[in-house]
Image (cartoon, rainbow, N blue to C red):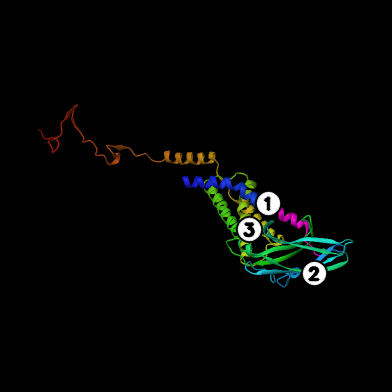
């Protein structure tokens, strides 16, 4: 019982943090969807094309991702076109990868590239990504950004990367943490159901089930990304999380209403009444009355009792 109580307390303390952990990425994803994808070409502004290790970033996809190798030198080539009315100075180039609104790797390289107005300038440089092995692995949606002297992005382009990193990375450990928290949330719900601690209100029970549902959806998202089966962009992972959340909410909403203390007391009283209405066995000297030998009959002559005849138990001493 001590272990069960400890798990319940741990589940209750982690529940709020777990829900917050799930809500924050969803809020970031909704904001990203509202902002729309990054565009590299806009009339009257700055545009560029980029290749990483010979692969064009604009045409990258889950089937043809940009490969990033931590143990190899990464070659980046840029062709920047300035359609503005003044020259543009590119201070640095940023390459990053984000999943569920969280950044898992980011590399900045200083380039100091000056692009005159109405002109196109090319640039190639080598990028050291040796630390990438401990940051991410699998298919990761990424982006390449051109930064000005203030660190603001003046142009950006989305891409799909396949990181040849390690499962024991920040990305892999984050997925493992989601898995552990999801298991704890499921155990917390199951124990609450077994002990009749679920809320009486159906909507609250649905919300209680929704947390594990979102967790299972995110575990699926991170697992398929690490196994290079799909790219967890906001357009793919968010529907998965929403579907699992809705399914588990329905399960919680339709789950049986738990008995409260008064209902349990009434059940106990009914059991007691059934026990009281049954036959009562009387015992004499520890034996049932039906098994107790009857007292020997006494003969009467008139009103005078006649003593019983001598027997084994009535012999004089």
Q: Residue furthest bottom?
A: 54
Q: Disc 3 versus disc 2: distance between alpha carbons?
A: 41 Å
Any mark on residue 122, and which? 2
Q: Residue furthest top?
A: 303
- Find numbered disc 1 in the image and state the secondary structure of the residue it sits on: helix
Side of 153 relative to 105 (left or right): right
Q: Disc 2 versus disc 1: distance between alpha carbons?
A: 39 Å
Q: What segment is highlighted magenta in the picture?
A: 24-40
Any mark on residue 24, and which? 1
Vertical position of residue 302 compared to residue 232: above or below: above
Instruction: Identify which residue, 262 or 95, lies in the foreground.
Output: 95
Q: Earlier in the sequence, mark 2 or mark 1?
A: 1
Residue at 66% x, 57% y: name it. 241
Any mark on residue 218, and which? 3
Side of 50 relative to 85 (left or right): left
Q: Earlier in the sequence, mark 3 or mark 2?
A: 2
Q: Is residue 257 visible?
A: no
Residue at 57% x, 45% y: name it. 13
SS majority, magenta: helix
Residue 228 in picture, x, y percent from top left: 63, 67
Q: Earlier in the sequence, mark 3 or mark 1?
A: 1
Q: Is residue 169 visible?
A: yes
Q: Between tags 3 and 2, which lies in front?
A: 2
User: Does 25 lie within the magenta span?
Assistant: yes
Side of 278 relative to 98 (left or right): left
């Amino acid at each position: 019982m001590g272990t069960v109580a400890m798990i319940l307390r741990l589940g209750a303390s982690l529940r709020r943090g777990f829900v917050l952990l799930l809500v924050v990425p969803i809020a970031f994803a909704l904001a990203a969807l509202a902002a729309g994808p990054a565009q590299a070409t806009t009339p009257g502004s700055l545009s560029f094309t980029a290749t990483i290790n010979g692969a064009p970033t604009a045409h990258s996809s889950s089937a043809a991702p940009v490969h990033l190798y931590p143990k190899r030198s990464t070659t980046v080539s840029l062709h920047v076109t300035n359609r503005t009315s003044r020259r543009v100075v590119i201070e640095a180039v940023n390459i990053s990868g984000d999943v569920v609104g969280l950044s898992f790797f980011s590399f900045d390289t200083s380039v100091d590239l000056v692009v005159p107005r109405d002109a196109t300038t090319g640039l190639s440089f080598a990028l050291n990504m040796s630390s990438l092995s401990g940051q991410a692995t699998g298919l990761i949606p990424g982006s390449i950004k051109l930064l000005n002297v203030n660190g603001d992005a003046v142009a950006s382009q989305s891409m799909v990367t396949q990181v040849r990193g390690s499962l024991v990375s920040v990305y892999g450990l984050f997925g493992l943490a989601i898995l552990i928290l999801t298991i704890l949330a499921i155990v917390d719900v199951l124990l609450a159901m077994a002990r009749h601690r679920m809320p009486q209100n159906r909507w609250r029970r649905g919300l209680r089930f929704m947390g594990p549902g979102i967790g299972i959806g995110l575990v699926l998202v991170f697992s398929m990304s690490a196994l290079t089966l799909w790219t967890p962009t906001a357009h793919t992972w968010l529907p998965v999380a929403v579907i699992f959340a809705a399914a588990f909410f329905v399960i919680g909403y339709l789950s049986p209403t738990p008995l409260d203390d008064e209902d349990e007391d009434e059940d106990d009283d009914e059991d007691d009444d059934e026990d009281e209405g049954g036959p009562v066995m009387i015992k004499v000297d520890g034996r049932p009355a039906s098994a107790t030998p009857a007292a020997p009959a006494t003969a009467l002559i008139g009103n005078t009792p006649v003593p019983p005849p001598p027997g084994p138990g009535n012999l004089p001493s």
